[in-house]
Amino acid sequence: MLKLIASRIATAIPSLIGVVIVTFMLTRVLPGDAAAYFAGPAATPQAIAEIRTKLGLDKPLPVQFVDYVTALSKGDLGSSLSTGQPVATEIASRLPASAELTLSGLILALAIAIPFGIMAAVKQGTWVDHACRVITTAGVSLPVFFTGLLLVYVFYFKLGWAPAPLGRLDVFFTAPPTVTGFYLIDSLIAGDLETFRSAAAQLAIPTVTLAIFALAPIARITRASMLSVLSSEFVRTARAAGLTPYKVIMVYAFRNAMLPVITTLGMVFSFLLGANVLVEKVFAWPGIGSYAVEALISSDYAPVQGFVLAMAILYIILNLVIDLAYGVIDPRARSEA
Amino acid sequence: MTLANPADRGSASSSSGLAATLRHAKYVISENPVTGLAFGMFLVLIVAAAIGPYIVPYDPLASDTKAALQAPSWAHWFGTDQLGRDMFSRVIVATRLDMGIAIFSVALVFAAGGIAGIAAGFFGGWTDRIVGRISDTIMAFPLFVLAMGIVAALGNTVTNIVIATAIINFPLYVRVARAEAAIRRQSGFIQAARLTGNSEWRILLTQILPNILPIMMVQMSLTMGYAILNAAGLSFIGLGVRPPTPEWGIMVAEGSAFIVSGEWWIALFPGLALMFAVFCFNLLGDGLRDIVDPQRRT
Amino acid sequence: MHGVIDMTQATTPTPAEEARGPLLEVHHLTVEFATRKGIVTAVKQVDLTVRKGETLGIVGESGSGKSVTSYTLMRILDRAGRIAEGTITFSGIDVANATERTMRDLRGREISMIFQNPRAALNPIRKVGDQIGDVLLHHLQAEPRNVKAKVIEILEQVRIARPQERYHAYPFELSGGMCQRIVIALALACQPQLLIADEPTTGLDVTTQKAVMDLVTELTRARGMSTILITHDLGLAATYCDTVVVMEKGKVVETAPAEQIFRAPQHPYTQKLVRATPRPGIALSDLLPEVAVVPSPLPEGERSAPLAAGEGAQASSQMPAPPHPDPLPRGERGLPGAPLLKVENLLKEYPRQGVPMGFFAGLMGKKAPPEEAIFRAVDGLSFEVNKGESVGLVGESGCGKSTTSTIVMRLIDATSGKITFDGMDIGAIPAKEFAHHPMRRRIQMVFQDPTDSLNPRYTAARAIADPLLRMGEQFGIRGAAQMRAKVEELATMAGLPLDLLDRFPHQLSGGQKARVGIARAIALKPDLVILDEPTAALDVSVQAVVLNLLEELKQTLGMSYLFVSHDLHVVRLLCDRVIVMRQGKMVEEGTSEQVLEAPKAAYTRELIAAIPHPPV
């Protein structure tokens, strides 16, 4: 198992290097004056020249790259023009908000999609199956920001069940003392049920929005891989040996069917992290996505670059976790290591 | 059919192949009316994109403050926005821009990703490693986030949205084309072609490519929907298209401020148009997959 | 169906056997499948009887309904299939109408099954010991505390060495033969009364096949079990079964004791099948039905094969004279002409990682010691092929025969060694350049899988024309009409009806695709054709036709063949000389008769002994 972890980390390193090079290139190498980007739209030529020297943009590219990597290794992502705050600090303080939203969306999606996909495959051709097909095709066609707005209209404006889409907590509450950064967990640790309720209410609609988005691909792949496993020869062997349908489906088919699902989760994460940005904008969620969007609008480049890098690193880590989970289930992947 | 001379034999055999494909397509549509519906939806989109600007009742950019924020009515089917512009006209006119972005980006990535993937799968070795490394690096980013970064770096223009959308789709095309080329590389008919003096490039173009093209077409249809969503998402957060240009994503963004006060129609209709387009391409992709490869039906 | 029971009784006259009652009785069984094109009847009015302790063989070619019959007995048909008519009685239980619960108790406990492709039949991510344990626990043959000991006991019974260790192995860590033993262990774990073996050895090497079949026979005999063996191989069935049932297109056409089926087949289809089965002491033409049988029972489209003497002569009369100045001695087996191909000290090395892991792990236990990093697929091989001669290259999978043929084909380069073709050192030309070399057209190939070897988007005519378009300058073909004429000439020679020329591969039968492949291979009038298991993917009756076609073409065109195969009997029919290979080396070389009738090497003897010997 240790060998597997080591080998997977080793395969993640080239991706990490690639990510760092690309983020560097995005600002320094591509056409356009990077100093002008960093200086912002209203800067005078002197200000631009100053920034150029300050950022070392007058040095040769390889030197710039070394400087960039050195700064990165110290956790220095530069500072925001508009707030003057270091980007790394801002991102670190906003990350838990994004993570709480993304994870709850994913968990909800998995909790619905996997049983749904299995049901559709096991009861192929019945109404569950047809419902699954319609929902998955419709689900991938929904723009996530649009779903969010529809839900806000229905549950906030029409029914009044949900609070206003304005952040993580109602204005009358203060954030619980930070332990994990997840309000749901922190408020429980603090024993503050009122805050917990408010946090949960704020979280509900954005979570559902993300879940609807992530549900379709997961249910689709679960159904497809379950179908193919159910028609495989080893399931036939298990049936021919008289094992109960429950044992055949749960022990023989399900674990095998989960392998493609786990692989697909990587793609789902990629979509989710992107969708997160849009959902944060719709619900004024104070996460790193809305931080980046605000910076984009004011042409404040350092936060955007920091955001892209942070998301990429997060994504690489998530993929690593997925790979390890795969290795736990599939002995073949373990032996390759 | 008689065997034509060497120059046009390829087209002769592919035309009978085309006829067979069309027959099969007709069969699939009659078997699966949903695919027929998707073709119908596709036609609506094409018509809206082609002649939409000439048939809409109002100028999509003309504001009329007296008629601002009107709910849907006979005069304004989809209502009006905060500046009194006719939403119906705006939604229809936007079709051309949204479809244009998606089509250009998909065509771009189809050419680049398709060729790179086929070459990687067929030649293997260094070609494969380089193409694989590029695509792995792109895949190491959450795709939408990368698109944001690219547009922010290259500049906030529609062209750059097209480029960014193409880049993030690149690995998907490479993966499909590479896998299809790699399984065929060692197949008997490729070996047989080698035995009869075909060069590697000729094999790639005359034997591998025609076999992969249909699968790539399916991929194209499936990614069209994704490209539309991606471009709309970028403009929703304020990248690329700028107001007052009619574009579905930005129109939903403009309408989002009015959702909480109950003016639902400003965001709803462009959002529905987006869904319509994406749904159409997804259905079409599934239908095309059935035509091309009945076994992969899910 | 006539007298199933009568015949069985007539041939099992010993009182002991008469005392045995029927264990399984199938009466008028009809199975239908609902498909998009409507109802398809896969099994029609089938009657079967299996007595206690008896081994019944069900033999048929693809599409005969033999596997569907066996799945029906277990009631594990997929959703679309249903029993339309008939009864199945197993030990007094009405299987066709039994509840699913009853069936679950029967499956694995009373009737069990082993499958083709043993590796796929096992759950890839569950330890094999646990998989056997699941069955034992389910049927209450063991309790959680003693299940492991029971499983190990069963593993020992199926002769798995070091069962303690193998308990924890995953299927991918075991060889194909070992996996099949696990599947047998799984099937026999609960001591059932009936074992259904569905093509249990297809895809396994002949020596492994013998080991597996002997094991099954021994274990089932010791337990007094009945067995149904489902196979396409009449020889295998006749060797291991008491009674053989022959099925064709969903119907039982003949039921007879094994000894009778070869000696006195009754039904025309059985007669054809018996004739088409390669066996010792026959000639190639003996494989085909006698010419007098005009309404040929050959599969659709095989009928127009111009193999009757008249048509064959016509085909050769259209032919220009062979390109060689000296006409070769035809039909005189073993008479060597001048050497055409000479291979000396051929060596091909691969890095060790290219070797399938499971195979070695299976042989050497879980932790295979890291041997040398180099694996020799071909290890110092030398041989010659003379003009007009057919040489067989025989061996089991992994022996290096295919690597050798691919090198001779000049599709890959050897590590070292010399290949001389007609006096020219072609081994010195890199494989990449050989594609454009004038020598290219003189060495051609017929591939193993006729489907895989045809571009799905080319018509038959286009496929045959391809070599002519690229390298056919010598024929001076001008314009479409001449090309068409040439393609038609080649198709006629290969026995492909001309109206099929504009079809795509998926519209052709297996035999027809094989003919397209052969027509393409001979289009450039090559001197040497490499046949890479050209009939391995074909039904035996189609194989008979194709082998005869190949022989005839060789005579007509004066070609030489290098025939790569795992099947000694098939090789003997077509080849003058045979080379037996093992682990990249030559084990034995000699004329076909010598090697088959008086093998010198122990390995060759083992190989010959492993071929099923039906009672004749």
Image (spheres, grey):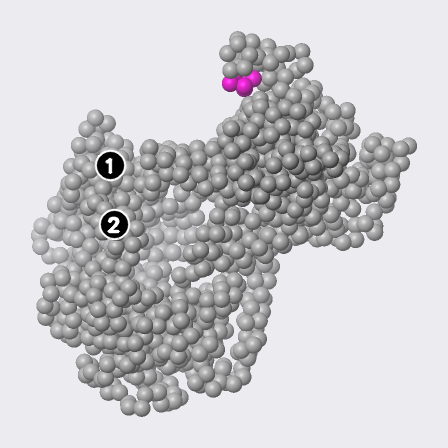
Q: Is residue C484 above or below residue A155?
A: below
The mark total stands at: 2
Q: Is residue C94 above or below residue B118?
A: above
Q: Is residue B94 above or below residue C610?
A: above
Residue B280 place in picture, x, y as percent: 65, 47
From which residue to which does the magenta span run? Answer: A180-185
Q: In the picture, residue C284 is in which quadrant?
A: bottom left
Residue A292 place in picture, x, y as percent: 64, 31
Q: Residues within 10 Å of mark 1 (few under 14, many from 20)?
A: some
**B267 within the magenta span:** no
Identify residue type, mark 2: Phe
Identify residue type, mark 1: His
Q: Residues within 10 Å of mark 2 (few under 14, many from 20)?
A: some
Q: Nearer the viewer, residue C598 or C107?
A: C598
User: Residue at 41% across / 69% down in the picture?
Assistant: B194
Same chain for the residues at labels 2 and 1, yes or no?
yes
Q: Chain of mark 2?
A: C
Residue C87 visible in the snapshot: no
The residue tagged 2 is: C359
Q: Residue A10: give its label.
A: none
User: Residue at 49% across / 81% down in the picture?
Assistant: C484
User: Residue at 20% across / 43% down in the picture?
Assistant: C365
Q: Chain of mark 1?
A: C
Q: Is residue B233 above or below residue C513?
A: above
**A184 within the magenta span:** yes
Say if mark 2 contacts mark 1, CB within 8 Å: no
Residue A93 place in picture, x, y as percent: 58, 22
The residue tagged 1 is: C168
Residue C279 appears left or right of B147: left
Q: Nearer the viewer, residue B288 or C249?
A: B288
Identify the residue at the far top of this view. A191
